[in-house]
Amino acid sequence: MNFRIREAKPQDIELIFNFICELAIYEKLRDDVTATVELLYESLFVKKQAEVLIAELADEPAIIVDSSTTSCSFTAIGFALFFHNFSTFKGRACLYLEDIFIKSEFRGKGYGKQMLKELAKIAVKRDCDRFEWSVLDWNEPSIKFYKSLGAIPMDQWTVYRLAGEPLKKMAE
């Protein structure tokens, strides 16, 4: 398979931003995107508040340059943005997947599953107690896919959020 997953580099920042915008359009939330390339760069590569994986497909078969190297070009087809949270009950870090996105023309071919497998490997390697994410209630294709992997919904929990003015008011 001419598919690879790699850690994002600072020069990928515009690509990451574009994937975020594509995801927001898919989720019907494009007007909610206030991130900028500059803000993402600072958050991801200066403050290191989250990490990103890039999924890529080779545009052409690999060309053997010599016995130790190969050459081919790759096209990015998706991304995953994740970070650590913490379980006080377990006393260990957990891996939280904020977003995963594969371009529509590449869905249903196993690339999303490979991204999730890579994230699961990272969680196990880092001794995380669990690997979690959220999904919009209306996103039946994703819900079905996640359940097929053995993921279970956390029906007993409701996410609450403070943002904008209510957050600022609470901070006073």
Image: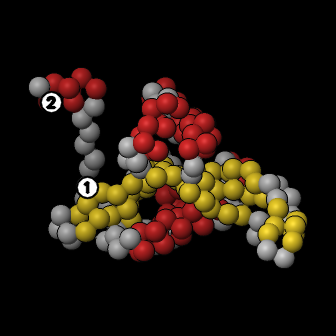
Quadrant containing the N terminus in the rendered view: bottom right
Q: Is residue 68 left or right of residue 97?
A: right
Q: Which residue is mark 2?
A: 171
Which residue appears at 41% of the width and 69% of the height?
A: 123
Q: Position of residue 92 (x, y in %)?
A: 25, 68
Of pointers 1 and 2, the one earlier in the residue sequence: 1
Q: Is residue 78 left or right of residue 163?
A: right
- 96 versus 9 height, above or below: below
Which residue appears at 69% of the width and 56% of the height?
A: 56
CA gap, disc 1 and disc 2: 25 Å
Q: Position of residue 160 (x, y in %)?
A: 25, 43
Q: Is residue 172 left or right of residue 34?
A: left
Which label belongs to residue 157? 1
Residue type at tag 1: Trp
Q: Position of residue 2 (x, y in %)?
A: 77, 65
Q: Residue furthest left?
A: 172
Quadrant containing the C terminus in the rendered view: top left
Q: Is residue 13 left or right of residue 154?
A: right
Where disc 2 sits, the SS reads helix
Residue type at tag 2: Ala
Tag count: 2
For the question of whether residue 101 can be seen, the reply is: no
Which of 70/120 is in front?
70
Which residue appears at 20% of the width and 69% of the height?
A: 91
Q: Give the color scheme: rainbow, by chain, secondary structure or one colour.
A: secondary structure
The crowding category of the residue bearing disc 2, from other C-alpha atoms within 10 Å (few below 14, some 14 to 19, many at least 20), is few
